[in-house]
Image (tube, rainbow, N blue to C red):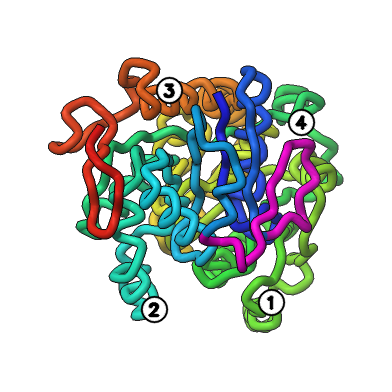
């Protein structure tokens, strides 16, 4: 089987897909799948996988250079000219593709007039023309369904997360040195959707109870809001306890997880939450709001405390974890066990292979695939407007 992953680019600045897509590709190769990457930007690609660079002038026709027999395409993202033109080419040439929405189909996005226009011109038909839609969490699926679009058969398969081999479950050993300061870590883009202002207000309440606590904020300032956040820190009187460390390598991030106590994410919406899953893989208990995709599963596994969207609720969870060593130790073990069992790369890749085979007509429908009333248990090959994709 050959799978071509179509994605605008793979970069740490792009968020979770910058790590989850390469991890999935590598896991697929370990299961003897021939994988290629078709990208518009290869500058940040450092993994050893075959890749095809599609320049802007080739966005419509560039994919024709890739052999199409016995090939399935896996397209990632919406609202991007590269992905949109790729899907247009694939659906009008009756070439099967799976689409990962990556949290980009949600009611909030429909308020943007540019996206509404793009939706009318291309994206609704591109989504309808996919043979299967991939979601990473049930929360992402529910958000997409609220938009009222016609969705082909859907599958919910999480992102793959690598568990550091050198890491041991935090707090499995005796308590750390008392001179070490308790630390909360956030990893992600500095973006308004991450609600870092809410995080800082919550942390200011923690400081009143546990004055030695530190907050480490890891990630690029993609929206130029760091100065605003630093000003808020000054107003809250927590500047000496909050550190913005910028973008870090995976090695450095692993070290930060190693000496932190809690990983947290309080985003307004988060289809999965790759960074917090990586923190749990390193043995960190998590504090999450309900808008984070992994929150439900992590809470049921005893790996996270899920809280309301208020500074008081978030701060209470931080204080509870920082004061209770036994609870931290228990949740640490649960966190690593949860990620290892649910997000193991080869497990995720095996599920995805089942979907690929079904779409190509080479296997039975996997249990993870749910069909709509048009699918009748088979891939949705219905013809869409201006498309040559006929029912098989």
Cα–Cα span, label 4 and label 2 = 53 Å
Quarter occupied by residue 258: top right
Q: First in sequence: mark 1 or mark 2? A: 2
Crowdedness of circle 3 by 10 Å Cα count: few (<14), some, many (20+)?
Answer: some
Give how far across and how far down residue 79 sits, in percent.
45, 65
Crowdedness of circle 4 by 10 Å Cα count: few (<14), some, many (20+)?
Answer: few
Q: Is residue 66 left or right of residue 181?
A: left
Q: Find disc 3 in the rendering and name its residue.
A: 357
Q: Find disc 4 in the rendering and name its residue.
A: 175
Magenta span contains residue 371: no
Q: First in sequence: mark 4 or mark 3? A: 4
- Indicate the secondary structure of the residue bearing disc 2: helix
Cα–Cα span, label 4 and label 1 = 34 Å
Q: Is residue 251 left or right of residue 97?
A: right
Give how far across and how far down residue 8 sits, in percent.
60, 57
Crowdedness of circle 1 by 10 Å Cα count: few (<14), some, many (20+)?
Answer: some
Cα–Cα span, label 1 and label 2 = 27 Å
Q: First in sequence: mark 1 or mark 3? A: 1
In-front residue for pair 254/299: 254
Q: From which residue to which does the magenta span run?
A: 41-60
Q: Nearer the viewer, mark 4 or mark 2?
A: 2
- Indicate the secondary structure of the residue bearing disc 1: helix
In-front residue for pair 158/350: 350
Q: Find disc 2 in the rendering and name its residue.
A: 114
Residue 184 vs 136, above or below: the answer is below
Cα–Cα span, label 2 and label 3 = 36 Å
Q: Find disc 1 in the rendering and name its residue.
A: 226
Residue, x 34% and y 39% (percent of image)? 131
**Circles 1 and 3: CB distance less than 8 Å?**
no
Q: Nearer the viewer, mark 1 or mark 3?
A: 3
């Amino acid at each position: 089987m050959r799978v071509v992953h179509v994605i605008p680019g793979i970069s740490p600045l792009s968020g979770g897909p910058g790590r989850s897509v390469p991890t999935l590709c590598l896991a697929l190769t370990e299961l003897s799948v021939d994988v290629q990457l078709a990208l518009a930007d290869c500058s940040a690609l450092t993994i050893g996988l075959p890749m095809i660079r599609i320049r802007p002038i080739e966005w419509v026709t560039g994919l024709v250079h890739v052999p199409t027999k016995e090939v399935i395409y896996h397209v990632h993202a919406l609202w991007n000219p590269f992905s949109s033109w790729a899907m247009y080419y694939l659906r009008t040439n009756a070439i099967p593709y799976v689409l990962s929405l990556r949290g980009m189909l949600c009611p909030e996005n429909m308020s943007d007039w540019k996206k509404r226009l793009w939706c009318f011109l291309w994206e609704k038909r591109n989504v309808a023309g996919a043979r299967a839609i991939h979601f990473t969490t049930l929360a992402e699926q529910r958000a997409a369904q609220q938009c009222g679009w016609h969705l082909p058969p859907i599958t919910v398969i999480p992102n793959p997360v690598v568990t550091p081999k050198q890491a041991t479950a935090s707090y499995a050993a005796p308590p750390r040195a008392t001179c070490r300061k308790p630390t909360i870590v956030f990893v992600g883009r500095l973006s308004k959707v991450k609600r870092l202002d809410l995080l800082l207000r919550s942390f200011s309440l923690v400081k009143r109870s546990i004055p030695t606590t530190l907050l480490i904020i890891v990630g690029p300032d993609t929206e130029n809001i760091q100065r605003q956040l630093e000003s808020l820190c000054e107003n809250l009187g927590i500047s000496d306890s909050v550190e913005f460390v910028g973008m870090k390598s995976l090695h450095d991030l692993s070290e930060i997880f190693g000496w932190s106590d809690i990983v947290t994410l309080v985003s307004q919406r988060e289809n999965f939450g790759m960074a917090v899953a990586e923190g749990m893989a390193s043995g960190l208990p998590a504090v999450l709001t309900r808008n984070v995709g992994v929150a439900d599963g992590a809470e049921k596994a005893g790996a996270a405390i899920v809280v309301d969207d208020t500074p008081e609720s978030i701060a209470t969870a931080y204080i509870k974890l920082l004061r209770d060593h036994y609870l931290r130790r228990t949740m640490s073990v649960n966190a690593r066990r949860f990620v290892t069992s649910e997000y193991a790369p080869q497990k995720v890749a095996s599920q995805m292979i089942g979907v690929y085979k079904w779409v190509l007509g080479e296997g039975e429908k996997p249990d993870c695939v749910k069909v709509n009333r048009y699918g009748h248990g088979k891939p949705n090959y219905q013809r869409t407007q201006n498309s040559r994709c006929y029912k098989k």
